[in-house]
Amino acid sequence: MPRIIVARADLTADTTVSVIAHELGHWWNSDWCSSPAAERRAWRFAGALLIDPREYAEAEWHQSSPGAIARHLGVLTDVIDGYRAYLEAA
C-alpha cells in the first residue's frame, strides 16, 4: 500500500522540509504509530538527512543556541536536537 506524506500549504519552507524529513524517518523505521521513541527516531533521521556536518560545525562555531543554529541552517530546532542525538549514537 502506498504511503503519502502531505504537508500543509501554509507552512514555511524550513518547516515543510523539516516535517517531511521527519515523516520520512517514520517511514524508514516502520513507525506507524506515534510514541516518544518513534518521535526521537524520526527526528534523528531528519537530522542525519538534512544536516551537513561541515555546515553544522560552522554554524555551531558562530551560534550558541539550538534555535540560532536551526535558523542559520534553515531547519526546525527539533532537527538540530535529532542531529545531536544522531552524533551521540554514532
Image: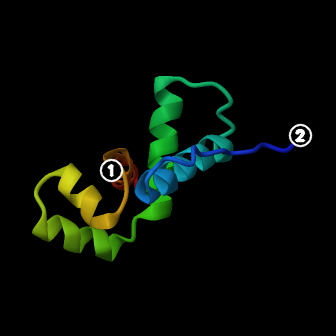
Vertically, is 70 above or below 53?
above
Q: Quadrant of residue 30?
A: top right
Q: Residue at x 52, y 42 (%)?
A: 42
Q: Nearer the viewer, mark 2 or mark 1?
A: 2
Amino acid type shown at disc 2: Met
Q: Position of residue 45 (x, y in %)?
A: 51, 51
Please state if 43 lies on the left or on the right of 63 as rendered.
right
Q: Find the residue positioned furthest to the front.
A: 10
Q: Residue at x 64, y 33 (%)?
A: 31
Q: Residue at x 57, y 25 (%)?
A: 34
- Labels 2 and 1: the sequence-earlier one: 2
Amino acid type shown at disc 1: Glu
Name the element at disc 2: loop
Q: Position of residue 73 (x, y in %)?
A: 32, 65
Q: Quadrant of the C terminus?
A: bottom left
**What is the spatial separation of the Cα atoms under label 2 and label 1, in whole angstroms?**
35 Å
Q: Position of residue 56 (x, y in %)?
A: 28, 68
The disc placed on residue 1 is 2
The disc placed on residue 51 is none
Vertically, is 54 above or below 48?
below
Q: Nearer the viewer, residue 14 or 41?
A: 14
Q: Position of residue 83 (x, y in %)?
A: 37, 54
Please state if 46 lies on the left or on the right of 65 as rendered.
right
Vertically, is 39 above or below 45?
above
Q: Nearer the viewer, residue 87 or 7?
A: 7
The disc placed on residue 88 is 1
Q: Quadrant of residue 52?
A: bottom left
